[in-house]
Image (cartoon, helix red, strand yellow):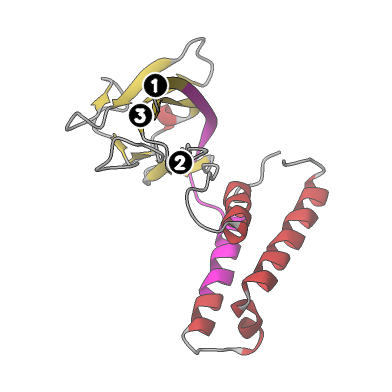
Amino acid sequence: MEVAGFPLLLGLLQVLGAQGGCVEVASGTEAVLGAPFRLLCIACKRRSETPAEAESEWFFRPEGAPTFQKILHYNPEEEQPWVAPGPFLGVLSWNGSKGTRDLQDLSVALSEVGHAHAGLYVCRLRRNLTFEGYTYSLARNQTLRLAVVDKARRDLASIVSEILMSRADCGRGFCHGWACPWLSGRVLSSFITSQFLFLQFLYGRVLY
């Protein structure tokens, strides 16, 4: 059983502990029918100072289908990404890094989710890293399964969002009793960690 909001929770814990720079966050896995949805794919470089060029491809396999099909290709040197004919044409768009050949955000967006968009996605990165005297090429895949539901449900993501909004109010001087303690990032991080461990125990699974 998968709990909606866990990718955001894990990503938030990473961000709270990070000192800056690129942070890899897992994508959401549940989209609402007829609503827009962003398929998140982050591929950070180990050394940010190393010059690099990259391009991205996305593949899709519908539920029950035997093979993947290429649905999008993005090259920074081209004005527009290529999108395959079919259910993704006119709906799928590039939503990642722009204005640079050094891609680290490879995300795409669906403007209106349909039942045909449920299935398994693969985000592929092709990157050339330039060192003194030579170029090193690598490829990397990230896989995610997207489910399409008729109605959004209140999940852990919305609860975390409310906590962050309360923390923002404190920062502007609007303290309302229990909200003021969330001004401390360390307290917020500890609270989210405790809730994560509780839900992990509740659902009886290891989420790492």
Question: On the image, numbered disc 2 is attached to which residue?
Answer: 40
For the residue pair 115 and 9, the one nearer the viewer reads as 9
Look at label 2 and name its amino acid. Answer: Leu
Residue at horizontal 31 percent and vertical 24 percent from the top = 73
Q: Residues within 10 Å of mark 2 (few under 14, many from 20)?
A: many
Q: Which structural element holds mark 2?
A: loop
Distance from disc 3 to disc 2, alpha carbons, whole Å, reads 17 Å
Magenta-tinted stretch = 139-165
Q: Residues within 10 Å of mark 3 (few under 14, many from 20)?
A: many
Among the two numbered marks 1 and 2 on one chain, the one whose residue lies closer to the N terminus: 2
Question: On the image, numbered disc 3 is attached to which residue?
Answer: 54
Q: Of circles 1 and 2, which is in front?
A: 1
Q: Position of residue 147 (x, y in %)?
A: 53, 35
Q: Could you tell me if residue 43 is visible in this image?
A: yes
Look at label 1 and name its amino acid. Answer: Thr
Can you name the residue that lies furthest to the front here? 133
For the residue pair 128 and 97, the one nearer the viewer reads as 128
Question: On the image, numbered disc 1 is attached to which residue?
Answer: 135
Q: Of circles 1 and 3, which is in front?
A: 1
For the residue pair 128 and 176, the one nearer the viewer reads as 128
In what quadrant of the picture does the N terminus appear?
Answer: top right
In what quadrant of the picture does the C terminus appear?
Answer: top right
Residue at horizontal 48 percent and vertical 27 percent from the top = 121
Image position of 93 (left or right of 157): left
Look at label 3 and name its amino acid. Answer: Ala
Q: Could you tell me if the residues under marks 1 and 2 are in contact, i.e. CB atoms within 8 Å?
A: no
Q: Could you tell me if residue 154 is visible in this image?
A: no
